[in-house]
Image: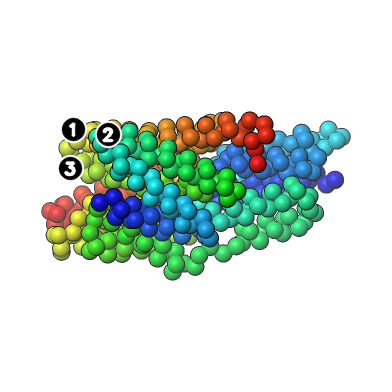
Amino acid sequence: MDYDKLVSMAADAGYLLIANGAEISRAEESVRRIFYAYGAENGEVFAIPTFINVSVSTPEGRPVTAIRRIPSRRVDMGKVDRANDLCRRVCRTKPKFESVEREIRRISAQPVFPFPLQVAAYALVAAAFTLFYGGNCSDALVSFLCGAAIRPICSLLERLHVNLFFINVAASFAAAAIALCFANFNASLNYDKIIIGALMNLVPGIAITDFMRDIIAGDLIAGILRFTESLLVAAAIAIGAGIALTAMRMLWGV
Amino acid sequence: MYYLPCLWAFFACAAFCLVYNIRGKILPLSSFGGALGWFVYLSLNFLNNDIFQFFFATIATAVYSEVMARIYKKPAMEFQIVALLPMVPGGGIFYTMEYCVIGNNEMFLKTGLHTLGIAGALALGILLVSSLFRIRSAVPGTKK
């Protein structure tokens, strides 16, 4: 058996899972199951949200290792779902490595929702959360605009390779600034409800709910990493909205 | 007046499913989990302690997600990630920041600690349910 290809394929499968927001324990277990299925029982895997390392010893005792850095992670449950199914199928049917690699490439190239629909989704999240937090219909309408502004700003800054912290500061500033501008011209708007609703798009819900699951599963480093990330994002959101609030107060005395 | 906030929670979760690229029948199911959690939160209003309310609402949502995950053979996370969002203290973070900007230190600390308490209640609820379900799937014969 070609151990080089096995290790490379297992690393790619793990990468695909983690880069799209799967739990660490799930990714590690999937890789371990693949090793078992192909009869490499001594295979080892170690993963944290930014890195995955897999290693196998060949029958001659030569270690084969592959590492992958995971520079950015997004949440794409559709891809996690398909990658998960792929791993199960691989363990059952043990297909050729080439066909698995092809499948992995196909899943990672699978299109997400088109950009206008993504903008609409962000806007809907903002509007729905504004209503949920007790805003009225005109609040939801303004919040819809704020939410729609967040997605283009994020994707523009991502294309410029700006870091995650600053992206959140900028997006949160923009959303809060739009809300406060509207609130300045129409005093009946609840600007707090609008801003909170719009910022729910950025709140690291995934990190808050995920880090506990990672820690429980014994992936302490992964859990701490996610916890740190969620603290950073929360701080960035607060800073961005805080700048907007302070600036508006100085400009107009809202 | 329980149904309206629960309905908004449902729609908010459904919109988030689009952001997280969750499609098919998981979309309404996980959104229902969000509405269920908020219903539990509101119906425990008599406790007069919202940290306990959040704790029990989280437990209800997490149990729902784990059960659904076993019925539909999908990762529990796919349900939980969206269903827990209405409980995430976005409002707490905002008001903490606002008091900080205004310079009201007393309220800043009070709101900040309260927000931390809510986040802790969430984390503890997930911890409890996740551990319990792990015990069950570790018992031989119950898996799959």
Is A111 displayed left or right of B15 in the figure? right
Q: Secondary structure at mark 1?
A: helix
Q: Nearer the viewer, residue A18 or A235?
A: A18
The nearer-to-camera label among 1 and 2 is 2
- Is there any visible trace of residue A19 in the rendered image? no
Callout 1 and callout 2 share a chain: yes
Residue B1 placed where, x, y %? 25, 51
Residue A170 to residue A10: above or below: below
> Label 1: which residue?
B106
Quadrant position of the C terminus of chain B in the picture: top right
Disc 2 and disc 3 in contact, CB within 8 angstroms: no
Per the image, label 2 sits on a secondary structure element best described as: helix
Q: Residue at left 85%, top 45%?
A: A1
Q: How is the image coloured?
A: rainbow
Give the residue pinned by disc 3: B102
Tell me if A72 is positioned left or right of B31 in this view. Answer: right
Dot 1 or dot 2, earlier in sequence: 2
